[in-house]
Image: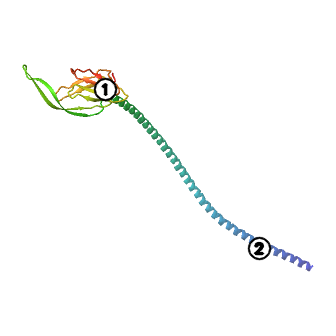
Amino acid sequence: MESWYKLKVSEVQGSANRSALESNYQREEVKRMRDNIGDLRGKLGDLENKNALLEKEVQTLNYQLTDDQRQYEQALNDREATLRRMREECQTLVAELQALLDTKQILDAEIAIYRKMLEGEESRVGLRQMVEQVVKTHSLQQQEDTDSTRNVRGEVSTKTTFQRSAKGNVTISECDPTGKFITLENTHRTKDENVGECKVKRKLDNRREIVYTIPANVTLRAGSSLKIYARDQGGIHKEASPSL
């Protein structure tokens, strides 16, 4: 019976020891878990702070993105406005250039018309410049009435200078020193010149100017000449070669 009690006491002591060990283990486990919870709470705080910083950075980036988008849209709008303004300016410049080109074409056409008219007029009236001076000493038999009853005949020696000029194809090829005739010549090889209604003037110092108008529809053919005589000089106005 005593041994039985001893056995039971041993069992109770063993059970108590096991309970004590389990209790110590549980206390150690609780302590370890508390330490882990403390560490996790510290890490959670750090993560929460980091998350707050990241959220703030995200917010800042969102603000920056919004501002960048606004600036980008403004730049696009400015670019479109600039392109539109440049297109309008280009259209205006093109219109002005076209107007200038039209005006230039009109002016060129008018200049061409005036040039043709001027060339035709210069050719018709024989206005090509050619100055030829002929100095010749000659004797003139001159009769003058000094009174109603007697005449005085004398021989006068004079020095006469002739100057002739022309423009175009028609030129004065010959001029009589005494003023009896002049010869007009068409120097062009192939082109006929209309000299109708052209005026030939003789002007001497202190004398009345003499003007002779060539009859209308008179054409001076290429390479030919026309001799015009003064009145009462016995000549006939004619074209030397070929005939009119």
Residue pictured at 11% horizontal, 26% vertical: 154
Q: What type is the residue that disc 2 sits on?
A: Asn
Residue extending furthest toward the right: 1
Question: What label sits on residue 225 in the rendered view?
Answer: 1
CB-based contact (under 8 Å), mark 2 and mark 1: no
* Residue toward you, 69 or 187: 187
Q: How far is the residue under mark 2 from the one under mark 1?
A: 154 Å
Q: Where is residue 157 in the image (x, y as percent from the top left)?
A: 14, 31
**The residue tagged with tag 1: helix, strand or loop?**
strand
Residue 99 x %, y %: 42, 35
Quadrant where the N terminus is found in the figure: bottom right
Picture coordinates of residue 155 (x, y %)?
12, 28
Q: Residue at x 60, y 59 (%)?
A: 54
Residue at horizontal 26 percent and vertical 29 percent from the top: 174
Residue at the outermost bottom position: 2
- Write down the residue under mark 2: 24
**Residue neighbourhood size for the residue with mark 1, other residues' Cα within 10 Å, grouped as few (<14), some (14–19), many (≥20):** many
The kind of residue tagged 1 is Ser
